[in-house]
Image (cartoon, rainbow, N blue to C red):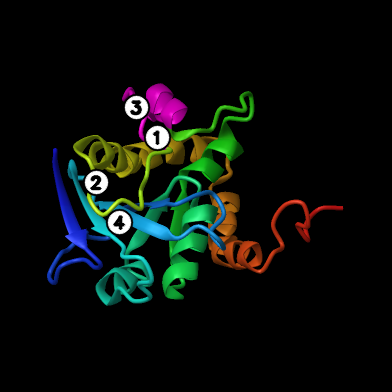
Amino acid sequence: MTVYLYQEDLPEGLDFGTSVAVDTETMGLDPRRDRLCLVQLSAGDGNAHLVQIARGQTQAPRLCQLLNDPKVEKLFHFARFDVAALYNAFGVDTRPIFCTKIASKLVRTSTERHGLKYLLSELVGVDISKQQQSSDWGSAELSKAQMEYAASDVLYLHRLKAALIVRLQREDRLVLAQSCFDFLPARAKLDLLGWGEPTDIFHH
């Protein structure tokens, strides 16, 4: 595994193919309040590319071009949050999307354990550490442990997607899942406008 770190944007000429795993690290869990600090990406080839976002930064042209490229699927775990964080930071409409958390909730209905750590352990046979999850992502210099943690969140999403696709097809829920994924950019915008919990417009 090789982890590459860039400042403020992706370098020119970086090709992720037709599918890229994406994750974000922020200063907290409210994308309206807590700034975006890091964007992680992987083509599923065992390498991770990390983009450190500066405080007050509002543009990342090459990253945004990738996120909005209709020919490149973006894989997330809990896309609702990451898509909102990216839109809040850059105004980018990320699509098309595959969300492993939603896929898990559609086919693993016998459990409430849909976290990435549980899914990777059960479906991919990989154990990842969550020790750095709440560390200071706004730091000017990331530690080796932070970079390795950030990379682990995207390195295995392609394999996880493949395992979940098998179950979605088996349970005849792939079309339903895709409809959910297509709605995620709108769901993220509703969150940013204040229509998340407890004022979710889809609640009674």
**Earlier residue among tags 3 and 2:** 3
| Local SS, label 2 | loop
Which amino acid lies under the numbered mark 3 shown in the image of this protein?
Answer: Ser
Specify whether residue 95 is in view.
Answer: no
Element marked by disc 3: loop
Under mark 4, the amino acid is: Ser
Q: Is residue 18 left or right of residue 104?
A: left
Of pointers 3 and 1, the one earlier in the residue sequence: 3
* Mark with earlier residue (4, 1): 4
Q: Magenta segment, which residues?
A: 117-133
Residue with the mark numbered 1: 163
Circle 1: is it few (<14), some (14-19), or many (20+) Cα within 10 Å?
some
In x, y percent, where is residue 6?
18, 60
Q: CA distance from mark 4 to mark 1?
A: 15 Å
Task: Determine the CA span between mark 3 and mark 1.
Answer: 21 Å
Question: Mark 3, mark 4: which one is toward the viewer?
Answer: 3
Disc on the earlier residue, 3 or 4: 4
3D distance between C-alphas at marks 3 and 2 = 17 Å
Circle 1: residue type: Ala
Q: Which residue is mark 4?
A: 19
Is 138 contained in the magenta span?
no
Quarter occupied by the N terminus: top left
Q: Report the residue marked by disc 3.
A: 129
Q: Which residue is mark 2?
A: 142
- Kind of element beneath mark 4: strand
Q: How far apart are the alpha carbons under marks 4 and 2? A: 26 Å
